[in-house]
Image (cartoon, rainbow, N blue to C red):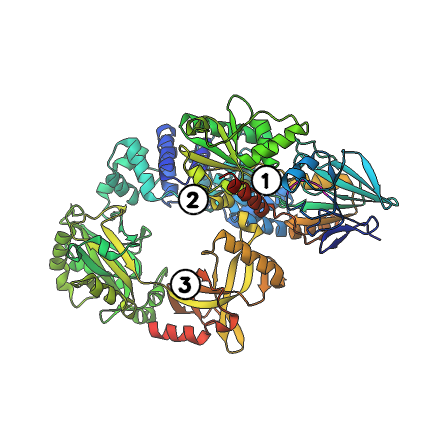
Amino acid sequence: MALIEFTKRGIYCKQGDFYVDPWWPVDYAVTTHGHSDHVRFGNKYYLCHTLTKPIIKRRISEDLNVETLEYGESINRNGVNISFFPAGHIIGSAQVRLEYKGEICVISGDYKIEDDGITTPFEPVKCHSFVSESTFGLPVYKWQKQEIVFNGIKNWVNDNINQQKTSVLIAYSLGKAQRLIKNLAGDTPIYVHNSIANLNEVIIEAGVNLPNTIRITPETTKDELQKGIVIVPPAMRDSRWIKNLSHPVTGICSGWMQVRAHRRWQSADAGFALSDHADWPGLMEAITATGAEKVYVTHGFTAAFSRFLNDEGIEAAEVLTKFGQEDDEENKVDLAEQNENK
Amino acid sequence: MKRFAKLIQQLELSNKTNDKIAALVDYFNYADDKDKVWVIALFTGKKPKRPIKSALLKYWAIDITETPEWLFAESYANVGDLSETIALLLPPAENTSDFQLHKWVEDLHDLEGKDDETKKDFILNAWNKLETQERFIFNKLISGNFRIGVSNKMLVNALAKQSSLDSAQIMHSIMGKWNPYEITFHELINGIHVNTDNSWPYPFCLAYALEQEPEKLGNLSEWQAEWKWDGIRGQIVKRNGELFIWSRGEELVTEQFPELHFMIDVLPDGLVLDGEILAVQDKQVLSFSTLQQRLNRKTINKKQLEDAPIGFFVYDILEYEARDFREEPLSVRRKTLEQLIGGLEESPVMISPVINCSTWEELADLRQTSRSINSEGIMLKKRTSHYHSGRKRGDWWKWKINPYTVDAVMIYAQKGSGRRANFFTDYTFAVRDGENLVTIAKAYSGLTDKEIKEVNSFVNRNAIEKFGPVRTVKPELVFEIAFEGIAESKRHKAGLALRFPRILRWRKDKKADEINTLEDLRQLLQSTL
């Protein structure tokens, strides 16, 4: 009997009677990471990585019942051994390894292969079956080393400062924002939106070494911002606040920026192909390293990616999930915060 | 090539005209003269001849990357551009190259007539020394168009700023006939070639759409009102005994319209007319779909000449007695035109009539009758206006009538490309034909991001069948589709085709049984013939 099944509520392990990243309330939710398409309100118990705990408490509710594991640690639930391994996606993101009577299944959540300098890097885990995303599961998506991308961003910022323009980077409050902060920190001060500053506090308190940033308040002057780097969440993109800055130029940091059609569709001033998801070679490398006999593809280019795996001799199936819809959710969260701050 | 690649990147990075012009000026300040000529040629659509078919590029890319053909197709569907798909698929280059743009163009030119093996060696070698962005441009040099939002006017403004020459003069020069392999940058922007060329046309003066109440334009007597005709904007040039007909696409179309050739004997030399090429019978304008039978044909037979006779409605006079006439006020130009063309009564060439009304209300009423004479509304031109190069706000307005509309139901949905690859954004619509639904149009624009997400979620929940990227969906969502015209079509099952269909709005208030029928559209078609 298979270790997991895909149900209306999410990925379910019958032997252990728990769910992984369920999207409807359940008794016991094993949580891969803190993005809102993977962790929701209303579960009785949560199991997540130590660093994810303060994040979800801050984002969802202080009242959650949360148990935690470190990477490599395990607990037993109804005879199923549950352990966490780094997924490299964002701070605290974990692959969930399940073992029952010698059968091993790994649910990877979202992941990326490259070491981003702030997240514990991805570790492949041997298993029989592997649940993978395929957000960028087409061979046209191949990332450049982040060092090159960050040099591009730094040059862009410097040019903007010289031309009296204000550099505004659009990034998710959780994950992308901290990655930018870590890698752009230097002589240019970094100003962050409230929602990012709040998460930063929680993350620093949990012991992560994050460079200093400045929280944007009504007292922050346009002149200061023009000489710095401004980071705001996607919900702020078309806001009047940005329009009122001194010659604002926006840059979007996302894997989609690899493709011109998408850069145009977003109508930002600059696009940087920087993703927290694995690129095509990354997905292939990760899957091959697991040695899995069966791969479930959950979100992204599921049809193309699973067909390719099957052609390569790796049995794969597409699974319909509600993952990969974080854009909307993030927007809601951030809009709520934005309104609070008015 | 690196410099050119950087230019393209900068042009794509900004939505602001001033930034784009600054990037162009910067490029023209520092680039090689030969490269500059090619940049002007490429941006104005003077493409070098294709030495290699795009299909071959695709197969070579598939070959060296060992990508299955279906996966290439999936990637292409997502990226939306063949040159870019190939550039992204290829492995990182092992070498670099300092070749300049013109060198690549010339080397590609030299491949003409070589065998496929030689061509393949050249291309693979080139791919292996170009970065992704350079590769994309290289592929575009072979197979595509540079559609990067640089209008001729923007290009000319940048050249004028960089060279301190007059922009109208530069526009003249680059619109004339010139050969990028031979001309120097200096000769090109100084217009050395145009003085010896009889054919050169002027840039068309274009109008903005009127979005305010016409009363706000002031006193009607200051304005000349004309019908806005729905044909092909054209210029007729007569110089030194030669006649040339230009279309708005800056294409010479003289041969396509023999009905107008008689003018070579009638018009004086040193004359340029602006007007509309239309299908005309007994001085009445026929529908655009009739005119269409005559467009883009290499040969014309007798039947086509009879079914779709061509005429030319003259709007304006740009050159008179070999003198640039564009600085004269419209009232003077119109008077000159009337004296000159008034005598051609019996020919298919006539002056586009002026509409005489004393009040804006009267004019607005008349505008409602536009369709009955196959006009698409009214043009308003200030009587004191000069003939501008390109679009300029204020002097000329187009006051179009509202488009036709039809309520139709969505029956297929397809995913978009790029970021939209994750959303169903391209829809096919149907109207009712008895018990059946018959498709009438495909459209993808006109919805907000929020609506797209809503439709997307409907498609995900209501998909019936899957054909590759296309989903058949439950016929439930009703949309109001706007379109500019309707024509018979043997290619479409419905027997008719809509011109420029787009989504006007989502009719959440309507159910699928309340949509229009095929019969409604047939009646509309009959009424326009």
Q: Is residue B467 visible?
A: no
Which of the two discs, 3 and 1, sits closer to the camera?
3
Which is more toward the observer, A265 or A19? A19
* Image side of residue A123 versus residue A199, left or right: right
Q: Amino acid at mark 2?
A: Phe
Q: Residue at x 55, y 68 (%)?
A: B475
Instruction: Work out whether B183 lies above or below B368.
Output: above
Q: Chain of mark 3?
A: B
Q: What residue would you read off at disc 2? A: B146
Q: Position of residue B250 (x, y in %)?
A: 31, 50
Q: Residue at x 51, y 63 (%)?
A: B428
Instruction: Work out whether B85 lies above or below B337.
Output: above
Instruction: Work out whether A176 lies above or below B249.
Output: above
Precedes in sequence: disc 3 or disc 1: 1
Q: Residue furthest bottom?
A: B434
Which is more toward the observer, B163 or A75? A75
Marks 1 and 2, Cα distance to the nearest angstrom? 21 Å
Numbered range of the magenta stretch: A31-35
Q: Secondary structure at mark 3?
A: strand
Q: Secondary structure at mark 1?
A: loop
Q: What residue would you read off at disc 3? A: B482
User: Tags 3 and 2 in contact by the CB under 8 Å rule?
Assistant: no
Marks 3 and 2, Cα distance to the nearest angstrom? 29 Å
Precedes in sequence: disc 3 or disc 2: 2
In the rendered structure, find residue B90 and report the number of the disc placed on it. 1
Which is more toward the observer, B365 or B163? B365
